[in-house]
Image (cartoon, rainbow, N blue to C red):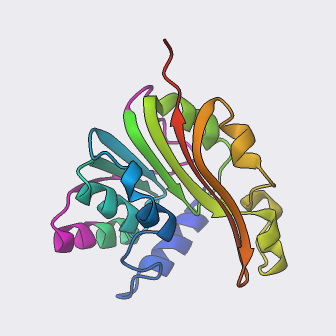
């Protein structure tokens, strides 16, 4: 990302209103039974913190990475309001180094940088859980997104083929098109 991206997100998040809402993404909330609440979690591109705060409320020690100071301020305010704790990291996620076998849960919602795929595989502990959801190529019918910002068909399935897929969907309705994945990193025995 660039300084321009940082300024863009600071401007978007620099309002009183939570532009993405205060509740977690539906995919995360609807599948909360997979969340054990044990261990460390990482929310990549945390934004205003709704998913990080939800995971913290389930018992995880959550680290949230984002490039926007304004987003982090709102995430921390939301965490205080909900009685949760989130450890923010102000960083450009495209160059942020993820430690190996560190996290029991990784969340990535509506952010796509394909360079993160190997980092996610490396950073998730064996047995760890991945929640990933973002736009697919079908979304281009409804928006002016660049093609590199959307997933190809079944791309998440291919990228995380070595994981045990617990749930997967590709949706195209109501002018929204996205793929959602829940997968567990297979433990080496």
**Image vertical order of residue 101 relative to residue 169, above or below:** above
**Image vertical order of residue 75 relative to residue 37, above or below:** below
Position in image of residue 65 (x %, y %): 41, 52
Position in image of residue 125 (x %, y %): 43, 29
> What residue sits 79% from the left and 78% below the top?
144
Residue 31 visible here: yes
Residue 60 vs residue 99, the one in the foreground: 60
> What residue sits 48% from the left and 70% below the top?
26
Instruction: Give the farthest residue toward the top.
Output: 189
Position in image of residue 178 (x %, y %): 68, 66
> Which stretch is magenta?
76-102
> What residue sits 38% from the left and 54% below the top?
33
Position in image of residue 161 (x %, y %): 69, 34
The image quarter containing residue 46 is: bottom left
Q: Quadrant of the N terminus?
A: bottom right
Residue 138 vs residue 170, the one in the foreground: 170
Residue 90 visible here: no
Residue 160 vs residue 94, the one in the foreground: 160
Q: Does the magenta stretch include residue 99?
A: yes
**Image vertical order of residue 50 relative to residue 119, above or below:** below
Q: Is residue 170 left or right of residue 14?
A: right
Residue 39 vs residue 3, the one in the foreground: 39
> What residue sits 71% from the left and 68% below the top?
171
**For the image shown, how many numbered marks are present on the structure?**
0
Q: Does the magenta stretch include residue 51?
A: no
């Amino acid at each position: 990302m660039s300084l321009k991206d940082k300024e863009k997100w600071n401007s978007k998040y620099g309002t009183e209103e939570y532009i993405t809402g205060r509740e977690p993404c539906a995919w995360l909330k609807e599948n909360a039974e997979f969340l054990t609440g044990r261990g460390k979690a990482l929310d990549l591109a945390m934004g205003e913190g709704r998913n990080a705060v939800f995971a913290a409320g389930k018992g995880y020690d959550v680290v949230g990475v984002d490039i926007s100071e304004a987003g982090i301020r709102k995430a921390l305010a939301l965490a205080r309001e909900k009685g949760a704790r989130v450890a923010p990291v102000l960083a450009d996620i495209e160059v942020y180094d993820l430690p190996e076998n560190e996290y029991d849960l990784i969340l990535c919602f509506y952010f796509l940088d394909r360079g993160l795929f190997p980092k996610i595989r490396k950073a998730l502990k064996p047995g760890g859980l991945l929640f990933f959801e973002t736009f697919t190529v079908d979304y281009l019918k409804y928006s002016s997104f660049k093609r590199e910002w959307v997933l190809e068909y079944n791309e998440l399935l291919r990228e995380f083929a070595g994981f045990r897929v617990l749930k997967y969907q590709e949706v195209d309705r109501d002018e929204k098109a996205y793929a959602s994945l829940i997968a567990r990193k297979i433990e080496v025995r």
